């Protein structure tokens, strides 16, 4: 409640200030206008005073000679002195307080001069009242007061000391000036009242105008706001219109582009070598010439309008429905094989791919159909050939396996034959071959190499076939010459096996299994890693099996003693790394466990 | 364009005061002019014998010399009319209008002439070449000489108190007193009017009152 009241007070104060401004401006305008009026009036009455002086006493005489009467000069110069200064103020300083008071004084003095020039005629005294009436135009009682004081003083002083000048006669009472002043005061009373009313009206008008301006300002503000809103709305409408026109143009361009695209698409479809169908709402709505040709339709009308599923065999209906629904949802379908019915009812193999399409505003699908009958026939033929090839390959593998089995059987036969020649080492070749395989697996040797290692292990002493029986089977110690012959068995093995392609890769063990790590072995005195790995592996296994087997001249060594012996030979006889692996992984293994490894290796070898 | 003296309030106020003083000075000068009399006459103490005027028998005779075009003299004639009216036939008056050489009769027929003729009991005469006026020593229009029944000069001067202003004056009161057989307060008063003759020395030679 306080805020509106405060606003009202502020508004009233604002109107009040504006009203005072308007009143001040109006008064200034009035004062300026009245100043200009008096400038004109005083100039006029100055001329009138000269005219009156001339009319009353144009000349003065001296005998027959005459000259202008001095009153003419008085009217000219004194009247000019009285009039020109107020006129100058009215012209160059209109509206000022001093100007209008000087004008009031000058006007009253002019009245006095005119009264004097007319010899104090009573009629001329009305010039005073007329002047007061004109001065009332200022609507300023102070101006009237000044004028009244001046004329009162004039009447008083001249009435007392120069009555002829103002009353035209010296025969007047001393208080006669009071009568004149009384009339002036009487006139002033009415003029004051009139001025008060006039000022009051001016103030009322200023208040009304200020109020009206405030109302008009409010109205103008409301009008401006309305204009602004209208302008904003007009701008928005113009922008919307522009955007709409732009959209329409864009849509027209799009439609034209679409029409051109459709035309190009249709032309493309018409010229496509692949068959193409368009389905919409489950019906075929378009078929290009290639499709009509593929499905053997004489004219498009025979195909168009038919249900899509009607040209597809029933076993593909489920898949076809899924693909049609996918197209209608805007998704593409990948390449798939189907069968389509021709007009004669025969189903042909086709390969289709479909993409979504909008057909006359409705979602649909575009199916590209490729005849794959020839390809299917070729594929069938290829499959038949492949089957035949597989059968032959299986046969070859089988034969190869049988051949390998034959080789291995041969090798095993040789090995057993050697074992049978030396009764002391019976079963030795089989054991060492199995242990060597186990050790080689521990070293990560591949399956193919394992086969050669096994064969080399079985044939490690094949060279002994070249050693005469009296040396080989001699019960006592061998002589040095005999040892020379005995130590030549690796070379015999090399000479025998290197001529056979099948076992050449297995030659390392028979040829090098008596080489030693420190180079003191035979037949070539290889050392370190110059010795093939398979031979280094086998050398340990060979010694291990000899020590762990009974001999006619000794019992088999215990496990711990054998291990210690083997370990003692590491770095001299054997490869220390191989010794370590052997003792850690192979030596403690029971024989049957090692045999399992050998069996597994053999099975995998056979499978490959 | 604003004039410098107008644009500054203090200077305007000072100029206004100077202007007021100047105007007062002007009025003062006008007053001095209006109160400046013409040259007084050296009227003969007794009625001159060689003058073509008849003096009234058994009563006072007033002679007033008038310039036909003097505007101030009309106030003198107005006072004369008052005097004649109040003398109740005990005063004879002769208004002598100077007729200068070479002027026409119409030049003489002025408003002053008609005013004088309209006063009851006043004889208007034309004074060719101012012979009569010279006999009475008159030099200024409005010069009045009053002789008693014995032909002795009793008053000489003007009937107005000021240039061109009729009404009560010393001359008027003196003449009226003489007519009534009383002793006037003054026997000589200043004359306010135009010089009757060219070259007449006078402080001021102008008058008005149509």
Image (cartoon, coloured by chain):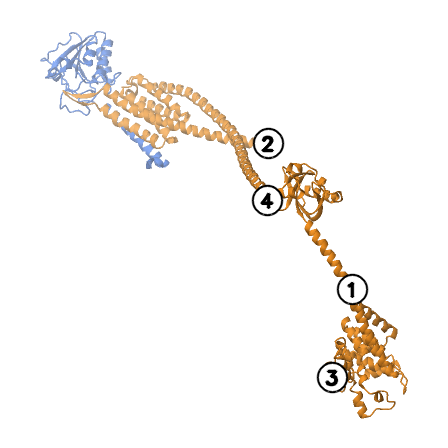
Looking at the image, the residue that sits furthest to the front is A344
Chain for numbered disc 4: A
In this rendering, is residue A504 above or below A27?
Answer: below
Q: In the structure shown, which secondary structural element does the residue marked by tag 1 occupy?
A: helix
Chain for numbered disc 2: A
Q: Which picture quadrant has residue A183?
A: top left
Q: CA distance from mark 3 to mark 2?
A: 119 Å
- Look at 41% across and 26% down and name the residue there: A140
Work out which quarter of the rendered image holds the N terminus of chain A and state it.
top right
Q: Nearer the viewer, mark 2 or mark 1?
A: 1
For chain B, the rendered hue is blue
* Residue A24, position as x, y percentages in the image: 44, 30
Q: Which chain is orange?
A: A
The residue pinned by badge 3 equals A527
The mark nearer the N terminus, 4 or 3, is 4
The residue pinned by badge 2 equals A4
Say whether residue A270 is left or right of residue B113. Answer: right
- Marks 3/2 in contact by CB < 8 Å: the verdict is no
């Amino acid at each position: 409640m306080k805020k509106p009241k405060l606003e009202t007070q502020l508004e009233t104060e604002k109107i009040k200030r504006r009203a005072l401004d308007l009143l001040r401006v109006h008064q200034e305008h009035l004062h300026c206008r009245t100043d200009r009026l008096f400038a004109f009036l005083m100039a006029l009455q100055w001329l009138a005073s000269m005219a009156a002086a001339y009319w009353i006493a144009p000349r003065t005489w001296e005998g027959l000679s005459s000259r202008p009467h001095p009153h003419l000069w008085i009217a000219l110069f004194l009247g000019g002195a009285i009039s020109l200064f107020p006129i100058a103020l009215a012209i160059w300083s209109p509206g000022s307080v001093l100007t209008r008071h000087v004008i009031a004084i000058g006007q009253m003095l002019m009245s006095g001069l005119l009264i004097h020039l007319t010899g104090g005629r009573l009629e001329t005294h009305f010039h005073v009242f007329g002047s007061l009436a004109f001065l009332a135009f200022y609507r300023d009682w102070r101006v009237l007061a000044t004028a009244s004081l001046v004329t009162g003083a004039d009447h008083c002083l001249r009435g007392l000391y120069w009555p002829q000048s103002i009353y035209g006669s010296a025969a007047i009472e001393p208080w006669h000036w009071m009568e004149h002043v009384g009339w002036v005061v009487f006139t002033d009373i009415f003029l004051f009242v009139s001025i008060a009313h006039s000022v009051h009206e001016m103030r009322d008008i200023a208040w009304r105008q200020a109020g009206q301006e405030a109302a008009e300002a409010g109205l103008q503000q409301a009008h401006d706001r309305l204009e602004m809103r209208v302008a904003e709305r007009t701008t928005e409408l113009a922008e919307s219109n522009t955007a709409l026109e732009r959209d329409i143009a864009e849509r027209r361009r799009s439609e034209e582009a679409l029409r051109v695209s459709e035309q190009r698409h249709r032309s493309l479809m018409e010229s496509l070598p692949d068959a193409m169908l368009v389905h919409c709402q489950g019906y075929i709505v378009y078929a290009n010439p290639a499709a009509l040709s593929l499905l053997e339709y004489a004219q498009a009308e025979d195909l168009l309008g038919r249900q899509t599923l009607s040209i597809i065999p029933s076993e593909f209906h489920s898949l076809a429905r899924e693909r049609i629904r996918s197209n209608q949802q805007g998704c593409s379908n990948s390449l798939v094989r189907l069968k389509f019915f021709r007009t004669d009812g025969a189903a042909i193999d086709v390969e289709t791919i479909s993409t979504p399409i909008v057909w006359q505003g409705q979602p649909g699908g575009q199916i590209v159909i490729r005849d794959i009958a020839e390809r299917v026939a070729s594929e069938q033929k290829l499959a038949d050939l492949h089957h035949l090839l597989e059968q032959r390959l299986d046969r070859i593998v089988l034969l190869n396996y049988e051949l390998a089995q034959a080789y291995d059987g041969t090798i095993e036969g040789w090995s057993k034959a050697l074992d049978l020649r030396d009764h002391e080492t019976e079963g030795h070749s089989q054991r060492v071959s199995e242990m060597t395989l186990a050790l080689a697996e521990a070293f990560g040797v591949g399956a193919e190499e394992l086969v050669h290692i096994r064969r080399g292990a079985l044939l490690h002493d094949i060279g002994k076939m070249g050693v005469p029986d009296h040396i080989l089977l001699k019960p006592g110690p061998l002589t040095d010459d005999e040892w020379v012959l005995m130590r030549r068995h690796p070379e015999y093995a090399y000479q025998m096996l290197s001529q056979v392609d099948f076992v050449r890769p297995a030659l390392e063990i028979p040829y090098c299994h008596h080489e030693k790590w420190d180079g003191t072995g035979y037949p070539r005195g290889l050392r370190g890693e110059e010795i093939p790995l398979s031979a280094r592996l086998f050398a340990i296994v060979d010694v291990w099996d000899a020590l762990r087997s009974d001999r006619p001249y000794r019992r088999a060594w215990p496990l711990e003693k054998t291990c210690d012996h083997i370990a003692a030979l590491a770095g001299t006889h054997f490869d220390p790394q191989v010794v370590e692996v052997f003792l850690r992984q192979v030596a403690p293994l029971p024989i049957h466990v090692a045999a399992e490894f050998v069996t597994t290796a053999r099975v995998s070898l056979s499978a490959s | 364009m604003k004039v410098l003296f107008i644009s500054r309030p203090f200077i305007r106020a000072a100029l206004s005061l100077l202007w007021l003083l100047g105007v007062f000075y002007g009025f003062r000068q006008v007053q001095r002019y209006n109160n400046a009399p013409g040259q007084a006459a050296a009227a003969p103490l007794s009625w001159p014998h060689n003058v073509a005027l008849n003096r009234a028998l058994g009563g006072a005779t007033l002679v007033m010399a008038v310039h036909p075009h003097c505007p101030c003299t009309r106030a003198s004639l107005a006072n004369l009319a008052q005097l004649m009216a109040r003398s109740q036939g005990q005063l004879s008056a002769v208004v002598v209008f100077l007729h200068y050489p070479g002027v026409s009769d119409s030049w003489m027929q002025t408003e002053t002439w008609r005013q004088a003729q309209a006063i009851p009991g006043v004889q208007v005469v034309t004074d060719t070449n101012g012979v009569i006026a010279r006999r009475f020593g008159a030099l200024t229009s409005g010069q009045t000489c009053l002789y008693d029944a014995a032909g002795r000069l009793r008053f000489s001067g003007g009937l107005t108190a000021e240039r061109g202003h009729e009404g009560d004056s010393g001359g008027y009161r003196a003449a009226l007193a003489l007519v009534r057989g009383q002793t006037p307060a003054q026997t000589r008063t200043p004359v306010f009017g135009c010089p009757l003759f060219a070259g007449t020395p006078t402080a001021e030679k102008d008058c008005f009152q149509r």
